[in-house]
Amino acid sequence: MTEDPITRLTQVHPDLEIWWDSSPLVYDKWAEKMVQNAPPEKRPALQEQLQRLYNTQDPVNSIVRGCTTNPPLSLTAIKSDPDFWDPWIDELIYSHPDLTTEELAWLTYKEVVKRGAAMMLPIWEASGGRYGWISGQLDPRLFTEVDVMVEQAEELSALHPNVMIKVPASTEGIQVLEILASKGISTNTTTCFTLPQIMASARATARGLNCVQKGSYFLPETVDYTKWRAVITMMLGRLTEHPALMVQAERQGIHLTWQDRHWLGIAIFQRAYRLLKEEGLPSKMLACSMRQGPLVAGKARFWDIEKLAGDVVFTCPPYVLEPLFQIGDDLDFENIEEVEVPQHVLDKLLQIPYALQAYEPNGMWLEQFNAHPATIATVEKFSAALDGLEAYVGERVAVVRGGEPATA
């Protein structure tokens, strides 16, 4: 049996987790396409490795331990299989003539999450609720609306017991994390880029577990926490690639290389990892938006993964897995506890306000979270995807309610 890079990565730490970063509904089609695009002599081994990574027919015996989704990924899942989704949406429209396009789109989004959760459920059941979670994201367009976010979280978590709620690290989202933890609802902090956001998220979750506030909070004895989990997603690439970093550096006459920018993401993630451990906080760090690179001595590297291996979660979309399998044996995974960020690089980075805000635990006030450049850009992208889903459903509404026959 060929040892693939993902298998080697999991050997760095016994609690390292690999998650699939897309809807489980699209995994088989992606894997098939990847095998077809490989050189003929490599196809058998690659097919075996990809099936071992995530076997949709026997998920318990897979390397994958969870799944993250977001509105763009959910929209992709629908568009990639119109033969199934168009008739399904049409039937939904027929059955609910009183619902608006927006309401129908939300039901469709929930169905994508529900079907994905059902595919991951065997892992959740076999592990007693430790693994097999899938993340369902709240409507990013409403990331300042506490009551609506809590209501949507309760809807999504009721779909399957293994649905974890993606809550934005917005000013208001931090409050939502505390409320959901008090209710025993598992969460995955998203739209999160900086150490202040990470620490606020982790501490809010801990407060919720302790039920230190009054009001609508449940008493601890009324909530089952035996299968509860919380992870905090740091979007590495979305932080380090935002133009604000380079613009501020240039204004101060500081030249940043690709390596410098990615050391920033690594440094923040590593510092967050250590602080969560030191404070005994219940959340686990999750890395996403990793980027391939750099070239070192002519060899391709993947620092965003190679230097962060440990008691963490990596959620891997196709654009991460493909280069990992291509680079293969040249990858050298290091334990996050042992990686040293070059001091001269850190000294240079911390002269830049954008980097300083992100690296220091008190670099931003809670009230500043919504105005962070990476937050604004990511919320806009995620919101556009839900707008796109509503437009897609709206086209089906025009067909069904416009008198044209729906295809079965």
Image (spheres, grey):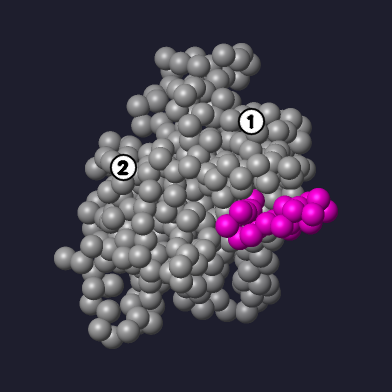
User: Which amino acid does the dot numbered 2 rest on?
Assistant: His
Location of residue 178 by image quarter: top right
200 relative position to 357: left or right:
left
Span colored in magenta: 237-261
The answer to whether residue 383 is visible is: no
Hey, which residue is sitting farthest left in the picture?
A: 1
Q: Mark 2 points at which residue?
A: 13
Mark 1 and mark 2: Cα distance apart in space: 26 Å
Q: Residue at point 24% right, 42% down? A: 126
Q: Residue at point 81% right, 50% down? A: 252
Magenta residue check for 259: yes
Location of residue 331 by image quarter: bottom left
Q: Magenta span: helix, strand or loop, mainly?
A: helix
Under circle 2, the secondary element is: loop
Location of residue 343 by image quarter: top right
* Depicted 203 relative to depicted 127: above or below: above
The answer to whether residue 61 is visible is: yes
How many numbered markers are drawn? 2
* N-term mark: 1 or 2: 2
Q: Picture coordinates of residue 73 (x, y %)?
A: 53, 61
Q: Name the residue under label 1.
A: 361
